[in-house]
């Protein structure tokens, strides 16, 4: 199964398993997701499905969004993503995808956007040690020299400097599903996932599942 689900991070808690072991878990509202579009080899030159999550009001939607969703007899969605489909996977426009696509004990990858930290200096962003803290020091939290002299005459790319921090696309791999609550459309995933509570995430079957099983 290559198709995952779209969801929303609700928060963290801890639960006991059948053996009495305590697990820290992230609660994720996953689905139901609607298949909005199906792409094929003839027209798009690849096989994929486009799914949507979290329906929104018509007054908040553009005409393009409404027309696109209408083809699937669905409402416009706040989050739309595309998944490649493999051989033998049959999905039709309008189908609903729920948490039943996953199983307890299965390993998944979770993709999200990390929390924003704003504009930070080099101490907060890159953990620089900083200069002396005494009164005589002229460089407490400065970056110091950045190497731009006659040679090489420019600053190299990826040089560690102050700047905007956070809001990066992060993929956390090989997280185990501890429990599935079908009635609430909720997945309990072991460990932490990127983003703040209420942020959208993508849950997909683990790509490196063999390595995950060995670690477990």
Image (cartoon, helix red, strand yellow):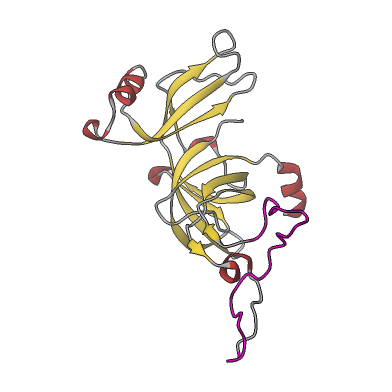
| Vertical side of 40 occupied by 28: above or below | below
Residue at the outermost top position: 42
Image x and y of residue 116, in percent: 47, 57
Q: What secondary structure is the magenta-colored segment mainly?
A: loop
Quadrant assignment for the C terminus = bottom right
Residue positioned 28% across, 31% down in the render: 61
Any magenta on residue 121?
no
Task: Choose top left, top right, bottom left or bottom right for residue 142.
Answer: bottom right
In this view, 191 is above or below 127? above
Q: Is residue 170 left or right of residue 29?
A: right
Give residue 17's quadrant in the image: bottom right
- Compared across the picture, whether 106 is left or right of 210 comes to left
Residue 119 image position (x, y, % from top left): 49, 62
Magenta-highlighted residues? 134-160
Q: Nearer the viewer, residue 129 or 136?
A: 136
Q: Residue at x 54, y 35 (%)?
A: 4
Image quadrant containing the N terminus: top right
Identify whether 47 is placed above or below 178.
above
């Amino acid at each position: 199964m290559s198709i995952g689900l779209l969801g929303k991070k609700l928060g963290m808690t801890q639960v006991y398993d059948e053996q009495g072991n305590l697990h820290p878990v992230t609660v994720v509202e996953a689905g139901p997701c609607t298949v909005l579009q199906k792409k094929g080899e003839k027209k798009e030159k690849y096989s994929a499905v486009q799914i949507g999550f979290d329906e929104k009001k018509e007054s908040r939607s553009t005409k393009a969004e409404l027309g696109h969703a209408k083809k699937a007899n669905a409402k416009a969605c706040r989050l739309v993503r595309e998944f490649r489909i493999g051989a033998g996977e049959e999905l039709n426009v309008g189908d609903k995808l729920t948490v039943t696509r996953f199983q307890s004990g299965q390993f998944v990858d979770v993709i999200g956007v990390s929390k924003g930290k704003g504009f930070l200096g080099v101490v907060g962003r890159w953990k620089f040690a900083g200069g002396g803290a005494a009164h005589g020091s002229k460089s407490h939290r400065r970056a110091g020299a950045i190497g731009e002299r006659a040679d090489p005459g420019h600053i190299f790319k990826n040089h560690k400097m102050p700047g905007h921090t956070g809001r990066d696309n992060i993929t956390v791999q090989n997280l185990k599903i501890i429990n599935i609550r079908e009635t609430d459309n909720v997945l309990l995933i072991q460990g932490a996932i990127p983003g703040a509570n209420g942020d959208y995430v993508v849950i997909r079957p683990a790509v490196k599942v063999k390595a995950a099983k060995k670690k477990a």
